[in-house]
């Protein structure tokens, strides 16, 4: 499975914060940390990851949250190691 650079950046932020299953991150927090000129593209890439079922969206009491689908852990790990060799 191939990921774009923006998708790898999103997955990296979820990975660093250990957002697997029970741990989750609000969509506003995930996309909000990016520069304003690419926030729209980050949201589109996040929607694409949700459609591929790599990232799962769930409701929380503070808004919509996302977490990494544990079935794709190995594929995400190899994609992250290609971009970030120090992981």
Image: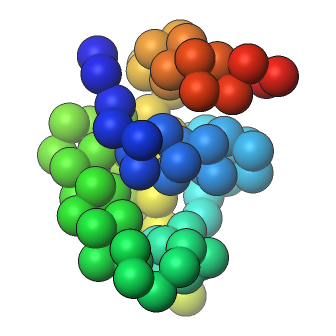
Image quarter of the N terminus:
top left
At a point 75% along the width and 51% down the height, the residue shown is 17
Residue 22 in percent (x, y) is at 63, 48
At a point 61% along the width and 43% down the height, the residue shown is 12
Q: Using residue 76 as the reference point, say whether residue 86 is left or right of it.
A: right
The part of the image, by quadrant, that contains residue 62 is bottom right
Q: What colouring method underlies this structural image?
A: rainbow
Q: Using residue 10 as the reference point, say whether residue 84 is left or right of it.
A: right
Is 83 in front, or is 54? 83
The part of the image, by quadrant, that contains residue 29 is bottom right
Residue 16 in percent (x, y) is at 75, 44
Q: Using residue 47 as the reference point, say whether residue 15 is left or right of it.
A: right
At a point 29% along the width and 77% down the height, the residue shown is 40
Residue 36 in percent (x, y) is at 46, 86
Above or below residue 3? Residue 61 is: below
Q: Is residue 60 visible?
A: no
Q: Using residue 3 as the reference point, say whether residue 30 is left or right of it.
A: right
Q: Residue furthest front?
A: 37
Is 82 in front, or is 77? 82
Above or below residue 9? Residue 60 is: below
Is 17 in front, or is 57? 17
Q: Is residue 33 visible?
A: yes
Numbered-mark total: 0
Residue 41 in percent (x, y) is at 28, 68
Image quarter of the C terminus:
top right
């Amino acid at each position: 499975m191939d990921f774009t650079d923006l998708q790898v950046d999103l997955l990296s932020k979820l990975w660093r914060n250990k957002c697997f299953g029970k741990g989750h991150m609000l969509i506003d927090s995930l996309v909000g940390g990016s520069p304003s000129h690419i926030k729209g593209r980050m949201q589109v890439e996040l929607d694409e990851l949700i459609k591929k079922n790599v990232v799962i969206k769930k409701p929380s009491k503070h808004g919509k949250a996302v977490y990494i689908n544990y079935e794709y852990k190995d594929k995400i790990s190899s994609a992250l190691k290609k971009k970030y060799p120090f992981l």
